[in-house]
Image: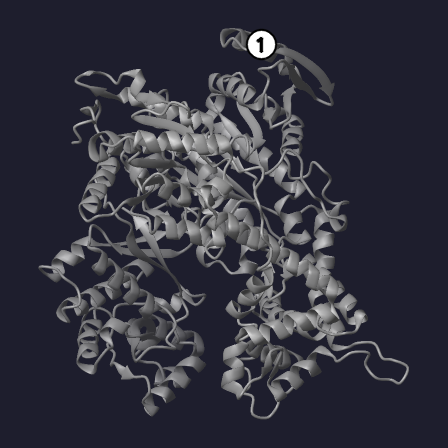
């Protein structure tokens, strides 16, 4: 302990996850590390963890930086959990004043990163940055080629050239900020604060909610750390940047600054330890309104029309196309191997330098029934399957790369202004379909169709159905929150302004809908946004009384003013204290008490930092998919409620689908993306990451099956509202669990599910296989093989069998994993099962599986009994002498797991246990000509495995 640092001790007991963080930091400090990156969900004790590291581990003067003043104050307040020799920490050792730092100083990021008003921005190297970008993205192989391209663009299309140059000027300005000196970057007040902190000898910086460092704060703080003498850094966040933005400059800088996550406290662990409330994630599927659906239908054919128009240009007076058609352009480029930056040496060189065009162009020609030029390989793949439910989406995703190339190089790169205009028109048409053509390629963007589905008017009506069911179960204890992106929908494009008015998809529209139904109106809903407070009309007098009482008790000087609207009142306040921070706190307390049982608001107001532990219903109508934003929203309902020891919150998504149309599943895809990093409890008690925890069917459901299953799925979801006690028990709060995620695999039988079952071969007394018992037998055959081949560590295979968990889930899925097993064993079993039940294309060895099937036979069939006796008598005798018999039939051909297929002798071990536990069968070398003949016959007979298999992470 430092001689100058007092003997500060935590007066409580650390949680298991907090102890883990402390242990890791101690170990890494001993190894010389100076930066620590900790991810922990809201309510898991990040503040106490940070203070413990300051007081008992690092023991250095510390600076805590937070994104807002509320969190800044929390850090100072939580020091009351620590003491010196049994007494409170003296107040003069704790500071929130930037001009008076102390032993621990809690400030906001803004206080030390305020930009200088006289900041000088240099733009001289913007063109160099553009050149580097073209080379990085493969559009040019060296600076000379890139400069030729830029100068050519400047001559042929100066407007677009200037637009792009302006973009790179801005990027260069940001670079200068990132690399600049503090004195040139920061305001005088920030420089003064940093100088005082440096004098204080700051040895530790705690960066709370450090995901905010993706912005200007992050650009400055790396330089700030050096200025302060490189103190130890502890970054704390519930929501680290996700993979969606991993290639952005800010995200790369964030990763370089913090490095990998040193410890992540998973939400399930904190729930199981009893420090967060359990929850279940639910989804409600809807269709667009009739008017919305008509627009989606009209838009659906636009991509096909665009391809047709690009391939069939108008003719000039001489009867010639006014430009080179898309398909002919593609054939010419493939034939000459010409690239914008020069001719490729050969096909392999061309493919390397323009891989997406090389693939997409041949796909397009195949679709159009056109041939590729001599010397160019045919497109590697089968022709389109008209029964493929994703057919239209596949077309678009596969052909967009070649269209992007044509628009950027053939049209935008032309000297003909009419070609420029055509390019911009085609780009606008693609934007409607959710594709943005950029300078060097294309990227997905929000399309009008996506926006219609995202903010469909039908979603507000779905909220009614959800809340009615929740109210039926929870009665007066219901505390529901409906969160939207905006108060009103912003930036509605002209194409859809007739469908989405300014309120559609916003909080105001949802609020109005709640008032229109008698049952949800009885919840006395209140709307809160950054600028508006709307009150249910019959609640006005009570709310006015309660608000005046609260304002008086909290010494807030506010005068309330009321205005009437159709079915509700608008509350406005006058006075210096009337601000969102005040009225959100006030109405949150009224919500907690049940004066209102439903709040409608925006994620900006009811998101990060907002806390109401009574929430038991959260309906998410936002468009967010990043794990950072999703976790912030979900974190609102996790808080424990001391009045409800067995609280479990329901988190709802409302998803709008139109699977029969192009882009009609965008909202469903957004829903699946949202759940990629979320854990939730499943019907068999596993805590699973991914959309499968909402319902097993969402994992493997084909696009065209979603609508067919919509009624049943919605019924299941509404039924689960009444099963809170069951799902609380499934979380197994307080019971021992494996501290790390376990690898698991889920298998769903193919459409020919009956072919997978039958009777175990040669075992007359055994019952018929079920999906579960068959999967269990195959898993045990793999385990025995892995154990004998010494590919899995255990005292005996019996020990592994005891850890084997095989259970059936809703939707016909079988889940398999090893409980309390080491990571290597879990992973190799999951991978092996996925390979046995998955595609066989890459398999080295194959093995057949058969079953005994029952049939009826009489020994008198085909004898004189049938020939000589009357039919009625022979039929009677044959029926009476019928006996049940079994015969062996091959029903599937499986891959031998890769771990057991490295050489023949190991594959033979698998064959031994396959024969013992599953079915007679011989391992067959895939490349053998006889095996290929067998494969052809098996394919013809439908014996090739095509089960849906998903590898997952679960907590148990």
Residue 621 seen = yes
Q: Quadrant of the N terminus?
A: top left
Residue 838, placed above or below residue 123: below
Residue 530, placed above or below residue 158: above
**The quadrant where residue 60 appears:** top left
Secondary element at tag 1: loop
Q: How is the image coloured?
A: one colour
**The quadrant where residue 804 appears:** bottom left
Q: Which residue is mark 1?
A: 557
Please name the residue shown 77% across and 48% down the image.
494
Q: Is residue 596 left or right of residue 535?
A: left
Along the line of sight, which residue is nearer the eye, 600 or 99? 99
Residue 664 seen = no
Along the line of sight, which residue is nearer the eye, 722 or 863? 722
**The quadrant where residue 228 appears:** top left
Residue 692, placed above or below residue 271: below
Dot 1: within a 10 Å radius of its alpha carbon, few (fewer than 14), some, or many (20 or more) residues? some
Along the line of sight, which residue is nearer the eye, 7 or 837? 7
Q: Residue furthest left?
A: 795
Please name the residue shown 53% across and 16% down the image.
595
Percent x, y of residue 908:
19, 79
Percent x, y of residue 870:
43, 79
Q: Is residue 400 left or right of residue 564?
A: left
Q: Is residue 683 left or right of residue 415?
A: left
Percent x, y of residue 331:
65, 85
Percent x, y of residue 314:
83, 76
Q: Is residue 82 left or right of residue 291?
A: left
Q: Residue furthest right?
A: 317
């Amino acid at each position: 302990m430092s001689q100058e640092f007092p003997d500060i001790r935590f007066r409580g007991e650390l949680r298991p996850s907090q102890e883990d963080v402390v242990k890791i930091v101690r170990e890494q400090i001993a190894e010389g590390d100076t930066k620590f990156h900790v991810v922990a969900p809201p309510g898991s004790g990040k503040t106490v963890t940070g203070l413990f590291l300051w007081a008992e581990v690092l023991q250095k003067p510390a600076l805590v930086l937070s994104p807002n003043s509320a969190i800044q104050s929390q850090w100072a307040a939580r020091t009351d959990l620590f003491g010196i020799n049994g007494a409170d920490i003296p107040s003069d050792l704790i500071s929130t004043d930037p001009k008076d730092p102390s032993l621990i100083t809690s400030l906001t990021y803004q206080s030390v990163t305020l930009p200088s008003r006289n900041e000088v921005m240099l733009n001289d190297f913007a063109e160099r940055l553009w050149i580097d970008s073209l080379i990085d993205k493969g559009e040019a192989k060296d600076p000379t080629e890139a400069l030729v391209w830029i100068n050519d663009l400047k001559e042929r299309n100066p407007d677009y050239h200037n637009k792009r140059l302006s973009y790179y000027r801005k990027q260069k300005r940001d670079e200068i900020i990132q690399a600049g000196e503090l004195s040139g970057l920061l305001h005088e007040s920030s420089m003064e604060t940093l100088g005082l902190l440096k004098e204080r000898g700051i040895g530790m910086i705690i960066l709370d909610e450090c995901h905010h460092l993706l912005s200007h704060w992050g650009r400055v703080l790396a330089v700030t750390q050096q200025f302060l003498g490189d103190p130890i850094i502890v970054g704390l966040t519930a929501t680290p940047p996700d993979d969606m933005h991993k290639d952005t400059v800010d995200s790369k800088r964030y990763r370089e600054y913090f490095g990998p996550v040193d410890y992540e406290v998973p939400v399930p662990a904190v729930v199981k330890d009893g420090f967060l409330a359990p929850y279940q994630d639910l989804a409600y599927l809807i269709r667009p309104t009739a008017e919305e659906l008509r627009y989606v239908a009209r838009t659906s054919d636009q991509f096909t029309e665009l391809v047709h128009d690009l391939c069939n240009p108008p003719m000039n007076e001489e009867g010639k196309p006014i430009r080179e058609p898309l398909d002919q352009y593609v054939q010419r480029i493939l034939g000459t191997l010409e690239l914008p930056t020069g001719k490729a040496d050969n096909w392999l060189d061309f493919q390397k330098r323009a891989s997406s065009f090389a693939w997409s162009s041949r796909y397009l020609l195949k679709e159009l029934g056109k041939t590729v030029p001599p010397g160019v390989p045919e497109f590697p793949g089968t022709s389109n399957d008209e029964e493929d439910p994703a057919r239209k989406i596949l077309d678009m995703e596969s052909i967009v790369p070649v269209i992007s190339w044509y628009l950027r190089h053939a049209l935008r790169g032309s000297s003909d202004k009419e070609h420029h205009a055509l390019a911009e028109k085609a780009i606008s048409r693609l934007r409607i379909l959710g594709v943005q053509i950029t300078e060097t390629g294309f990227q997905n963007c929000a399309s009008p169709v996506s926006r219609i589905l995202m903010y469909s008017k039908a979603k507000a009506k779905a909220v009614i159905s959800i809340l009615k069911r929740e109210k039926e179960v929870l009665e007066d204890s219901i505390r529901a929150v409906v969160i939207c992106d905006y108060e009103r929908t912003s930036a509605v494009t002209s194409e859809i302004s007739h469908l989405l008015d300014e309120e559609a998809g916003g909080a105001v529209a949802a609020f109005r809908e709640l008032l229109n139904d008698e049952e949800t109106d009885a919840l006395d809903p209140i709307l809160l946004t950054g600028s508006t407070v709307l009150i249910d009309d019959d609640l006005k007098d009570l709310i006015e009384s309660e608000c005046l009482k609260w304002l008086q008790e909290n010494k807030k000087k506010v005068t309330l003013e009321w205005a009437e609207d159709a079915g509700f009142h608008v509350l406005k306040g006058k006075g210096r204290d009337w601000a969102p921070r005040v009225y959100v706190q006030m109405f949150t307390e009224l919500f907690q008490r049940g004066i209102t049982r439903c709040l409608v608001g925006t994620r900006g107001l009811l998101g990060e930092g907002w806390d109401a532990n009574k929430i038991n219903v959260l309906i998410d109508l936002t468009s967010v998919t990043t794990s950072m934003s999703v976790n912030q929203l979900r974190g609102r309902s996790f808080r424990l409620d001391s009045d409800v020891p067995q609280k479990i919150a329901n988190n709802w998504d409302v998803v709008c689908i139109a699977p029969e149309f192009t882009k009609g599943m965008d909202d469903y895809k957004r829903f699946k993306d949202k759940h990629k990093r979320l854990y939730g409890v499943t019907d068999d008690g596993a805590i699973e990451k991914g959309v499968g925890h909402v319902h097993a069917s969402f994992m493997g459901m084909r696009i065209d099956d979603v609508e067919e299953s919509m009624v049943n799925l919605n019924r299941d979801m509404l039924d689960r509202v009444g099963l809170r006690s069951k799902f609380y028990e499934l979380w197994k709060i307080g019971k021992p669990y494996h501290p790390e995620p376990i690898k698991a695999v889920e298998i769903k039988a193919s459409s020919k599910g009956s072919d997978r079952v039958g009777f175990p071969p040669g075992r007359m007394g055994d019952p018929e296989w079920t999906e579960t018992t068959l999967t269990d037998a195959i898993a045990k055959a793999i385990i025995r093989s892995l154990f004998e081949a010494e590919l899995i560590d255990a005292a005996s295979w019996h020990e592994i069998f005891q850890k084997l968990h095989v259970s059936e889930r809703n939707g016909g899925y079988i889940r398999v994993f090893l409980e309390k097993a080491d990571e290597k064993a879990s992973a190799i079993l999951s991978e092996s099962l996925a390979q046995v039940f998955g595609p066989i294309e890459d398999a080295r060895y194959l093995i057949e599986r058969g079953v005994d099937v029952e049939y009826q036979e009489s020994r008198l069939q085909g004898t004189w009994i049938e020939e000589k006796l009357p039919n009625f008598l022979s039929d009677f005798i044959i029926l009476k002498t019928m006996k049940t018999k079994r015969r062996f039939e091959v029903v599937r051909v499986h891959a031998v797991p890769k771990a057991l297929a490295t050489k023949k002798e190991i594959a033979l071990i698998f064959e031994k246990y396959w024969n013992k536990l599953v079915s007679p069968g011989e391992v067959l070398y895939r490349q053998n000509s006889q095996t290929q003949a067998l494969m052809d016959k098996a394919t013809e007979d439908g014996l090739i495995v095509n089960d849906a298999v998903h590898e997952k992470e679960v907590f148990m």
